[in-house]
Image (spheres, helix red, strand yellow):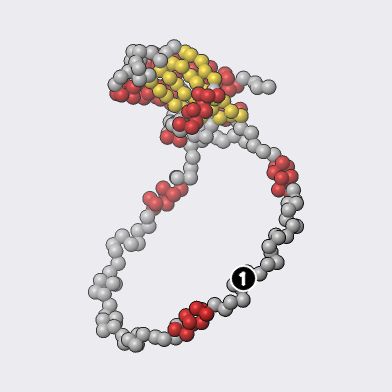
Amino acid sequence: MTTPFDTSNTLGKAQRLKSRKQIDALFAGGKSFFVHPVKVVYHLRKNNTPHNHELSDQSSTPNQTSDIPHPTSHIPHPTSDIPHQTSDIRHQTSDIRHPTSDIPHPTSHIPHPTSHIRHPTSDIPHQTSHIRHLTSHIGHPTSDILKFGVSASKRHFKKATHRNRIKRLLREAFRTQKQALAHALQQQACTLDVFFIYTHNTLPQFNALQATVATCLERLTKAVQKPRV
């Protein structure tokens, strides 16, 4: 049974592909295509879980070495017969009390002047802490099935502000049009890692880049829906 389809156009940190290990695996074993001026590298996986009977067979296999005793199990420890004299010494000295232990402190019966004053906010429950605790366990419905990354060529764009602008435009175009792809992944029970690389040497306009990203997402959706042998 698939999870409910999320209709919100969000692209949180959980959906961003930032792990160096995942990115290296994507470029090593993924497929790619080109829609000017964007190169798309993607890796599509089918969610497969082990069957219950396989796990039960593994758990029911007896351990053949469990009946073999350890070769040194019958040899007693060389110091097992030596009494622990130090324990008796501690027991004898535990009854000796300090000579001033019975003298009460002169100010021990005087209460602190502000001990009966409660903090004005002590009765107010910290609801925000419970809210954070509850929301920390709520994952995004598409964070596990779709991860997305972007890049811009440092050779073409020397300034980091230009590269960051291109990546923001790519993320925005992807965020507003990814719903059909996420829905196809949920229906097919697949996960997808995808990376968009901007290859042109001029700053793009958002409308043109949005159309390019739409074409890329259509091809990815078809690849997800394509029957696999």
Query: Observer-nearest residue: 120 or 87?
Result: 87
Q: Is residue 86 above or below residue 224?
A: below
32 on left or right of 13: right
Q: Which residue is mark 1?
A: 78
Q: Residues within 10 Å of mark 1 (few under 14, many from 20)?
A: few
- What's the residue at 46%, 17% (across, down)? 39
Residue 217 visible: no
- What's the residue at 50%, 21% (across, down)? 41
- Horizontal and vertical percent for residue 173? 41, 22
- Horizontal and vertical percent for residue 77? 63, 69
Q: Is residue 188 above or below residue 50?
A: above
Residue 35 visible: yes
User: What residue type is disc 1 on?
Assistant: Pro
50 on left or right of 163: right
- Horizontal and vertical percent for residue 124? 35, 58
Residue lying farthest front? 78
- Image quarter in which the N terminus is found: top right
Q: Quadrant of residue 126?
A: bottom left
Residue lying farthest left? 113
75 on left or right of 93: right
